[in-house]
Image (tube, rainbow, N blue to C red):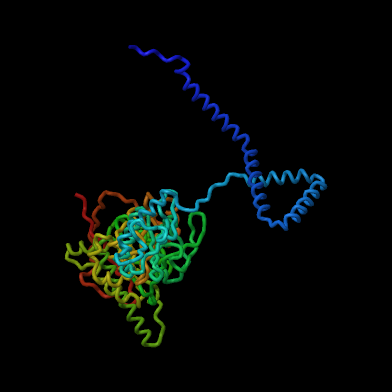
Amino acid sequence: MARRPLPRILSSGSAQIARSRQIARTAADSATDVLHPLIAISRGLRQLAATARHKWAATPKERRGPTLFLIAACVLVVAVIPYGPMVALITVMAAAAWKGRVRTPVKTGPDEAETGRLRALYEALVPYFSVTEDPAPLFAHGGEWDKAFSDYEFDDNGRLTRLRMTYPAYFTDGEAESRARIEQLLHAKSGRGREYLFTWDEEGNQLVMSVLPALPTSIAAQRFVTVPGETVLGFTDDGAVQRTVPVTQGEETRDAPPVVWRSGPRSTEPHLLAVGGPGSGTTTLLRSIALQALQHGDVLIVEGSGTGEYACLTGRTGVLAVECGLGGALASLEWAAHETERRLIAANRARQAGHPAPDDTKRPLWILLDRPSIFGHLAAADGRTDPQQLLQVPLRHGKAAQVTVVVAEQFDSVDSLTETVRTHTRARVVLGPATFEQVESALGTKPHTTPTPDVPPGRGYARLGTGPVLRLQVPATPDPYDDATSEAHRQAVLELLPEHQDGAEPTEPVRSPDPVPALPPDPVPTRSADPVPARSGDPMPARSPDPVPAEG
């Protein structure tokens, strides 16, 4: 049996009803927008009337008569004053409008999602902060989390940014393993990819977890306000150090907390070791140290990678040499060892004679080595001395001779460093992405923060001797001859470079992948096979360039 079609009035009725509702809703919204001031004033009048009624009910009966008399007197005075009623009406309407305005509700506690996060975090901490012998456990499954968490903050995404928690007194907070388990759990439950700071109050049995803001990367190389013997390795968090220096950041000048490394005879950490991965910023750190050291001393640079990262310093005043070959590195480090011995002997003779130390022994000498392990492999293959063996004298006696050694190496080659280098470089820097184990192996202790997998170049940690572990951001000091360098950073580095020794500004070197033609052989060798000790005041010995293989 075929169905009969519905009448037209029934089939089109629902559409007309929906259209009528939409028209009515639109009209109501328009009327609300137009009448919004009147609605606010009427709401305010109701609230003012309710307030007046509550105050009248709270007034004692013996004071109601004088109160009525005072109100009547005020009304009479307002009525007599010219324009008084109009001013009173405007005042009442303004007070009603202010009282009836729509106010943004103030958040007084966590919402449902934030409460769920805190509840999940509380339940996850129960196995670590509870024992069966506790008659009234602070942490228990299904317990009250607000008794353990006294202070908490969330970001716009609903993730924890700060948490203060109280833990039982019997928790072994004096053991590093116990603290590490709690920190790892909080890090995982609060969200990865951020750097957290954990502050343990063992006396009050409280732990504060806070998310650290990212250190600024816009501070470029510049002249820092320091005294001779002080080097700014980078900048850290506010409050981590007791000193600030003025820095220029873009077009603004502000005070920033620096990580200052002190070298020289009175330093407790006279030598430094920087460790990182490829592209972590260790070369940038050495370049920044070199620019600061050239203000008051001489610099000797030995580059193992041979990529020409220090070509901008070649031939500059105060730069003794920039060596990229094995032969030049051996000759330069051998001279540095003899120079250290000469300074020690000259200073000792002057003290025995009752005279001040000679001036040529007071000028600081900086030895910067970038990836010396590469030279070690080349020396072993060629049957020559490892350049690190020549660092024993500068490392052991450089403090008294104003000789400072800075070594930069990558994580995969740290094991190739000699025991002398690892022992005497007590100032340590770790840059780039690193695990807890790598940071602990380099610095001697774990940081109080959680390393993140993605960090910009020059970001890491620093520890001077037995001091605390500080977060570090190295000033942007790129190679000015690199095409990828921004113009602002290029000019910042070029302004810090000393003048050339001959007074002439050379052209920018061109890096070409084509092989260099062979040099003609020297008729007379300029370097003897046996090392000749440098005498007092002798300059660095002249040497012939390393042979370069000819084409074809």
45 sits to left or right of 174: right
Number of numbered tags placed on the structure image: 0
Taking depth in this image into account, of 439 and 54 the one nearest to the observer is: 54
Taking depth in this image into account, of 96 and 490 the one nearest to the observer is: 96
* Residue 432 coordinates in the image, percent (x, y): 33, 57
Name the residue at 53% across, 24% down: 20
68 sits to left or right of 144: right
Name the residue at 47% across, 18% down: 12
Name the residue at 72% across, 55% down: 64
Residue occupying the far bottom of the picture: 353
552 sits to left or right of 349: left
Is residue 359 visible from the viewing direction of this image?
A: yes
On the rendered image, what quadrant is the N terminus found in? top left
Name the residue at 38% across, 56% down: 478
* Residue 74 coordinates in the image, percent (x, y): 78, 51
Residue occupying the far front of the picture: 61
Quarter holding residue 449 = bottom left
Vertical arrangement, residue 262 with respect to residue 81, above or below: below
Vertical arrangement, residue 525 with respect to residue 533, above or below: above
